[in-house]
Image: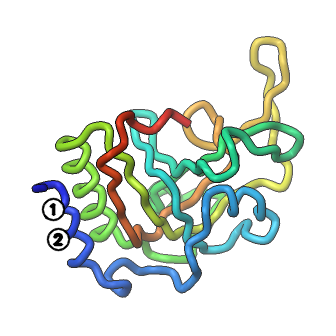
Amino acid sequence: MRLLVILSMVLVSFSPSTLGQSRSKPQSVCGVLRNIAQLRGKVITVRGIYHADYHGTALEGKDCGERIQLDGVPWPVAIHLQSASYYLDEPEAQVKVPFSPDLVGIAKIESAISHARQENPGAEIRLSVSGLLIAPEKYPTTSEQGRTVKIGFGHGNKLPVELIVKSYSALVLNKNSSAAPSTP
């Protein structure tokens, strides 16, 4: 019960203006991956299952199976989440971030997620995230163990796209989940 109270207080304390909420309707992870050509380079809002570990963070989707074909390769149905600070602090970054991230709002939601996971480690966290979608038209390749592989984003370059985070705009906890989200 305490967990629900904490999350309720966090959600009620944020207004759309506080969160820097995008005016676009949240899209599913699968919807974004299926429409990359139209969404590439745009600030969008995506909803999915939040996954975080020591390798990084991602939004996972379960609405189109385990994999999706992009540039002739099956990729996990997930979007790597990257802090805007990573690009803003890098003077030679190839991506120019067209917004100032809501660092205070992001920190508050991340704190709520941390508390929720302490109280219920198997909880499924659903999150809506606004940010700039980065996706190549053609994925670069490299050679790994004698085979050619496509280079994506996140840990091991295994995710097909990256969202440079502007803000978090919604948080929902599913306490009934018995297992933590899988690693993308």
Of residue 61 and residue 57, the one placed in the foreground of this image is: 61
> Where is residue 120 shown, x and y percent of the image?
23, 42
Report the side of 98 relative to 105 (left or right): right
Q: Which residue is mark 1?
A: 6
For badge 2, the amino acid type reads Met
> Where is residue 162 shown, x and y percent of the image?
61, 54
Q: Which residue is mark 2?
A: 9
Packing grade of label 1 (10 A; few <14, some 14-19, many >=20) is some
Pick the quarter of the image with the N terminus.
Answer: bottom left
For badge 1, the amino acid type reads Ile
Residue at the (81%, 44%) spot, across then down: 69
| Distance in Å between CA atoms under marks 2 and 1 | 5 Å
Report the side of 70 relative to 179 (left or right): right
Q: Secondary structure at mark 1?
A: helix
Of residue 145 and residue 15, the one placed in the foreground of this image is: 15
Packing grade of label 2 (10 A; few <14, some 14-19, many >=20) is few
> Where is residue 139 shown, x and y percent of the image?
81, 44
Pick the quarter of the image with the C terminus.
Answer: top right
Residue at the (32%, 38%) spot, across then down: 122
Report the side of 14 relative to 73 (left or right): left
Residue at the (24%, 64%) spot, across then down: 108
Of residue 96 and residue 31, the one placed in the foreground of this image is: 31
